[in-house]
Image (cartoon, rainbow, N blue to C red):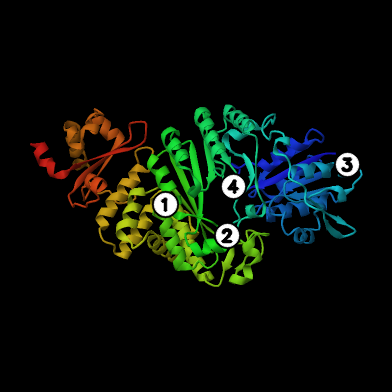
Amino acid sequence: MNTVIATLNAKYIHSSLALRYLKAYCQKDFPIEMREFTIKDTPMNIVTDIFLHEPDVVGFSCYIWNIEETIIAIDMLKKIRPELKVVLGGPEVSYDVEYWMERLPSVDFIVVGEGEETFHHLLQEISGDQKYHMVFGLAYRKDGTTVINPPRPKLELNDIPSPFQGFEDIPELRNRVAYFETSRGCPFSCSFCLSSIEVGVRYFPIERTKQELKYLIDNGVKLIKFVDRTFNIKRDYALEIFEFLIQNHSGTVFQFEITADIMRPEVLDYLAKNAPPGIFRFEIGVQSTRDETNLIVNRKQNFQKLSHTVKTVKEAKNIDQHLDLIAGLPEEDYQSFRKTFNDVFALRPEELQLGFLKMLRGTGVRLNAEKYGYVWMEHSPYEILGNDVLPFSDIIKIKRVEDVLEKYWNAHRMDLTLEFLVTRTFETPFDFFQQFGDYWEQRGWQRIGHQLEDLFTRLYDFLKEAQVENLSVIKGLMQLDYFLSQKNKPRKTWWTFDMEKQEQQRYMRLVADNPLWLGGEFAGLGLDEKALHKHAVLEVIPFDLPLYLEQGEIKEEPHLLIVYYGTGKGPVYFTGALSNVQILEN
């Protein structure tokens, strides 16, 4: 009996941990072929690939991001091979099972919840006596009626074989995201999350976890993303894994979902002192800072402690942090969400993800949707269209914030400029992103592509029209940000570079002859005029940049800005007051 297990990942770079577990558990008794596609693949290519493997059984792992595309492939497969047994599993179909069985007549079985043991038992029955009523955790059809068997007891995690060791495709994971888990379950009961439905947390033995991680590291996997819902809930376990990875990382990057307000001081201190820069990334779900909203969704959160953790990690400068917000939670209106956004933005996370509430099947917010007047998309991704306090008109306004936040803040294309704008120019960070997002929408820019230069010119156009103060200073910061965003000496600028060639040569000569004008660090480079012409760019900015960066003071005094690209480590910049030029020339 040939069996194909498949899924449609959101991107090619992603990989499926669920398929690996299923194959690891079942392959000792059944030949299992694992096939991964993306939601961008055409249905014809997906179906052709599966068809050519001549399966008797095909199983699909279903999620919110792939269910609709998966349904298309299933319908095609059943038309081609009506006798094919189609099995669905995964979080998207494990809740509201009757709905899925009714909606999808082409589906023969749904594996509900944890799938390894149930799928193995199902394969035994398909190839044997077909006593499907004996398979706990299974939904099937009998005489045209859906039957849902009792749930299966939780599997002992160490009984599941390794989802990595012995797999021939490990080399393919070197340039993809390898997903990894040390535990299953979540200790919290947030009513907007599917993890709240499963009670309790189970852990894989820590020595097994270390062995599996070392196997991936030794095989050159570059990015491992832990899918544990709260990696740091068990402090000693988390600390031991952190220590192991610090000692054995070999350049691999590891990403964790953590709950920041329960992070212990000793763990923070250890990471601050010992974590090599760049190997750890933390994803922290804040969602809302409104206490009343958190209470409604059964979310316990101490924002003061969370802030302390984020600030402590940020001060150590060795771990990037990604903070998440959800717009549309119960009783959080536009103004309340504005406050939530500003509360979290004040922490200056390296990334701030602004998402919108999804009414996932089986969750508490969906079951209580009528109470708060929710309306939402009928099909995946079930995103809300409004509720009693947040109408659709406000949702689309916040979506404009999300758009420019992603393009500018999260992309880190102009950090110096944005810091000036959100602290000195606009009332709050949210107001800047909202006003700029509205301007962006009014001009239809969301419908066209953007080069890097476009992002700068569009921001500058917005600031000119808004008639903001200190525009010349902001332009100087934007010019520096543009130079710093280039890996190599740029051939063009987003502004009109109007310095005459003769004047450029004059400044280059002055800098080469008087390197201490730009400071000791510049003088230490030992650059002659030829090297400057080859590897450096220059511009005149209208203010004292070092004074602003060191003390926050704006002094309108023209400075020469030199950005040098010849170090091999990215661009470096230097400034010197133009008031010294006459002295240097004499």
Q: Are marks 1 and 4 in contact (CB under 8 Å)?
A: no
Specify which label sits upstream in the sequence, 2 or 1: 2
Classify mark 3: helix, strand or loop: helix
Specify which label sits upstream in the sequence, 3 or 4: 3
Q: Are marks 2 and 1 in contact (CB under 8 Å)?
A: no
Q: Position of residue 306 (x, y in %)?
A: 46, 51
Say which of marks 2 and 1 sits in front.
2
Q: Characterize the local packing of mark 4: few (<14), some (14-19) or many (20 or more) Cα atoms within 10 angstroms.
A: many
Specify which label sits upstream in the sequence, 1 or 3: 3
Q: Position of residue 486 (x, y in %)?
A: 37, 41
Say which of marks 3 and 4 sits in front.
4
Give 476 or 530, whichever is nearer the viewer.
476
546 to the left or right of 335: left
Q: Characterize the local packing of mark 2: few (<14), some (14-19) or many (20 or more) Cα atoms within 10 angstroms.
A: some
Instruction: Residue under label 4, please give it.
Output: 229
Q: CA distance from mark 1 to mark 3?
A: 55 Å
Per the rendering, the mark at residue 409 is: 1
Q: Are marks 2 and 3 in contact (CB under 8 Å)?
A: no
Q: CA distance from mark 2 to mark 4?
A: 16 Å
